[in-house]
Image (spheres, rainbow, N blue to C red):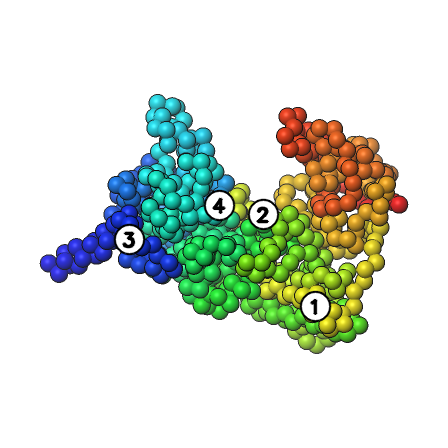
Amino acid sequence: MKFLNLRIFRALIFYIFCSSLTCGNPPPLDFDEMWRGFDPRLDPLETEILKEWEEDGIVMKIIRYRIGKFKGQKSIMAGVYGYPKGQIGLPGLLQVHGGGQYAHSNAVLTNAKRGYATLSIAWAGRISAPGYTVSPNEVKLFWEGKKDDSKYKLTTDWGALDAYHAPSRYGRDAFASIPVTDWTIDPIKSPRNNSWFLITLAGRRGLTFLEQQPEVDGANLGVYGHSMGGKLTVLITGADKRVKAAVPSCGGISDRYTDDDLHFATVSDPPSLQRISVPISFLSPANDFHGRINDLEKATSEIKTDKWRISSSPHHNHQDSPEFEVFTQLWFDQHLRNNFVSPNTPITELILAKGKFPQLRIKPDIGRKILNLEVYFTQQGILQERGKAKDNSTNTKHRFWKFVQPTKMDGQNEWVAELPIFSVDRPLWVYANIRYPLDEPITGAGYYYGTYKADSFVLSSLLQTRTSEELKGAGSRSSSESSLILEDFAQNWHRDWFSYQRKNWGIHTNKLYEPKWAAPKNDARISLEVRSQNPNEMVIWMDGYGQELNLLGGDAWQRFSLSRNSFLNSAGESLSSWSGLRELRLVPSATLDVPRGNAVKAVKLGKDWQGEPPEFRKLCWIK
């Protein structure tokens, strides 16, 4: 009887919470008010299995569970769930997809092969699994109730609400704003009308699903996600004490500059970060437009734990390579399975001295063998504060990080890197990366669910910054001498370049965006020497304009000298100026930009590469 009364009492509390969503009560004004009265365990899940199969000893399911009932209609979340067959006591992972992504079977499958049960939730309705694909077109079929269509499939149903994205059901989403419409919970401005709140609530219900599965250890749950899923990882972790470890990638440091005070106090990043007391690792590419690494220092000071790490790849924007992606798996191995110990975050000190270049001193954790140590610095971007100028996305994505090889101090666990800055009139940002070997290679699903294999991992230091005023005040040395040599292709040249391709040799750099390597004048030419053992074609690409190079093959070097008029877009228009260029690519093939409003078909240059990668030498400007 006492147990029954307790259930009735808790159900009443939940009913009061849900009723307050629609009865016109004053809206919550802060994070705690927003969640007061909500118990994610109380409402029945009413789980349904839409499809079930086995793959490589892994049980896989497409499922749906009840989120809640709002404005008289049920909201139901779909997802992909899987676990290794016949095992119990498994740690559980909640995987949260990003804005253009899907709940994906490969994330579930690869995690299960490593001993995890995983639920990948389809908050936008999109699902990718064998024999069960729900693309944006199928999401629309579901909205429209077209059950007779052969592609129709059950998926996430937000009922009377709309927390879909790309596309949103009613033509506008409620992430950056807090709208008041007939498809929002409250009839007045309220954070409960915001999609971040709704998906976080659904994610918390996903944790309830995990802890109720017989094969899962409900006291051992983790959350991770990429992009919008990275932000949602932080929101869910900040709101739910059941989370024991979290890994946001390209998110959780993406929303702290809003001018809306209600949004800032409730669904922005800081309120959630300030409530996180469990181990958390941030995967934050240095040029990411969504999760700005210049906010990591603030974020790590806001969380209530010293158990945090950072893995930050230079040059990358919203994508990564295996040695950075793999830290998600390692972090959960450490904190949910206790079979890995991460090295400590590198300690760095940025030193300014009169008449000298700035120096970064690095003390890495040497408890594990170090493969290499790298330092990267940039002078592009601005230091941000709420209510003040925001670093624009184009600059964030293309700022150039100059690689510096640090020198080890004799007899000490300390390395020093001299930073040859171009100017004291711009701020300085610098950090260090330490690469460690893995005891055994790890296979996992990356940010976009492609299978990767990693044999090393990278830990990063916090970003160190100095303002222009601090550089000038210290009398720091700078060298404003420009260089006609863009790349000599000697020693560690590739550290200033990057690639997202794992199957071809194509390379990218943002060097052109740094004034030191800008074109000397508009009638200059760009020159490159290339050698290819097989006859091939390749492309030089600059900000959407490209030129195809015909390589004859053999041992002889070929020299190409090109004017800006040689570089065309898909409409056949030539590059009007060398000024303001951002990204340069040397690639086997590339698609040229289509000018805005132009109906021409996109042009692709180059073709599939044959044989060994090409060799390069002396990429330079010719006056």
How far apart are the alpha carbons under marks 4 and 2? 12 Å
- Give how far across and how far down residue 375 sits, in percent: 68, 62
Of 56 and 604, which appears nearest the observer? 604
Q: Kindly identify which residue carries mark 4.
A: 98
- Mark 1: secondary structure: helix
Give the residue at mark 3. 25
At label 3, the amino acid type is: Asn
The numbered mark at residue 319 is 2
Judged from the image, the secondary structure of the residue bearing numbered disc 4 is: loop
Q: Amino acid at mark 4?
A: Gly
Q: Residues within 10 Å of mark 4 (few under 14, many from 20)?
A: many
- Residue furthest toward the bottom? 411
Q: Is residue 503 left or right of residue 88?
A: right
Q: CA distance from mark 1 to mark 2?
A: 34 Å
Q: Decide which of 47, 7 is in the foreground and name it.
A: 7
Would residue 87 be found to the left or right of residue 380 on screen? Answer: left
* Relative to 447, residue 340 above or below: below
Question: Cα distance, mark 4 to mark 3?
Answer: 32 Å
Disc marking residue 77: none
Which residue sits at x=67%, y=67%?
Answer: 466
Pointers 3 and 2 in contact (C-beta within 8 Å): no
